[in-house]
Amino acid sequence: MIDITPFFHLESYRVFYHTAQTGNFTKAAEVLHITQPSVSYAIKQLEEALGIKLFHRQSKGVTLTEEGKALFQYVEQSFAMLEAGEDKLRAIKRLEAGELRIGASDSMFKHLLKPHLHTFMSRHPNVHLRLSHGKTSDIVRRLQEGQIDCGLVHLPVDEERLEIQPLIHVQPVFVAGESYRRLSDCGPLTAEELRAHPMLLLSSGSSTRIGIDQWFAAQGVTVDADIELGSVGLIIEFAELGFGIACVAREFIQQELREGTLFEIPTTMPIPRRTIALATLHGMPPSLTAAEFVSVLKASLEGGET
């Protein structure tokens, strides 16, 4: 069995590689910025470790033996791969390559992340973008499993393995389409009065649904979804079509409210604001690409550019 430490192994092959390319110990030493005796010694040590003669020593230099030629093919490929790897890393550092893996809900992608992703990708078109859709519990799991670099989640999130950085607050409101427009003009409604109408709610288990259920429960009302959907976008569409009353973040339906396709329904008991936070894995620094995007996102949100 060949016993060569990893450092000696790599450096010996580096000396072998440049000696084979230059055909001369002295020239190899110049390329490597070491002494000629150091080159000679390294080649001798490698030959002894491998038990094979690699070079024919001649008066004007050295040439590879047949065994040396066979080894050189693999060493040359190995150093080419290492050089390619270094080039790749330099490209990633300049954000000319790399991967950006983000998880969020559909509403966060559409109303919060989309403009920032568009700007980032316009500046760095060679970065590979991977988006992962899901509710907060899905995003937490994917972070813990290393499937994504960062995610946007609704608080509270009680996971010690995650770093949580609050980003923005959103205000949930009850809304409906033209069919229920009268409810927006008849004064604040109680939870019981709201429940008398069809409810469009997100699937059970989502953090948004849990918040809505808690709001009703605080007023002694148990709510069941007449229509239960897994997408905020679909809930908004169904509300516009008159299927019932939905609860969504006001910040995510600004256009619908301006155009009059949705109407806000006031309530007697305020709905607590919700916090959207950036989540990353604790103790696991994000990739250079992800770190740059997170920096851009936080700066934009802190500057009010949502």
Image (spheres, grey):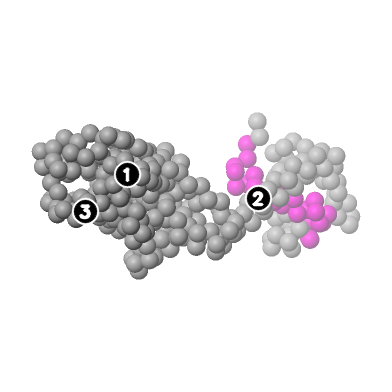
Most frequent secondary structure within the magenta stretch:
helix
Is the N terminus in the top left, top right, bottom left or bottom right quadrant? top right
In the image, what residue type sits under mark 1?
Gly
For disc 3, the marked residue is: 184
Q: How many marks?
A: 3
Relative to 243, does residue 255 appear above or below in the rendering? below
SS type, badge 1: loop
Q: CA distance from mark 3 to mark 2?
A: 66 Å
Asked whether 26 or 104 is in front, the reply is: 104
Q: CA distance from mark 1 to mark 3?
A: 14 Å
What number is the disc on residue 221? none
Q: Residue at x 50, y 51 (%)?
A: 100
**Furthest-left residue in view?**
220
Q: Earlier in the sequence, mark 1 or mark 3?
A: 3
For disc 2, the marked residue is: 82
For disc 1, the marked residue is: 242
Q: Is residue 237 visible?
A: yes
Q: Which is closer to the viewer, label 1 or label 2?
A: 1
Is residue 223 shown left or right of residue 241? left
- Magenta span includes 13: yes
Asked whether 133 or 145 is in front, the reply is: 133
Q: Residue at x 38, y 51 (%)?
A: 108
Q: Residue at x 20, y 50 (%)?
A: 183
Quadrant of residue 297 within the rendered picture: bottom left
Residue 10: give x, y in percent of width and height.
65, 47
Q: Residues within 10 Å of mark 1 (few under 14, many from 20)?
A: some
Q: Earlier in the sequence, mark 1 or mark 2?
A: 2
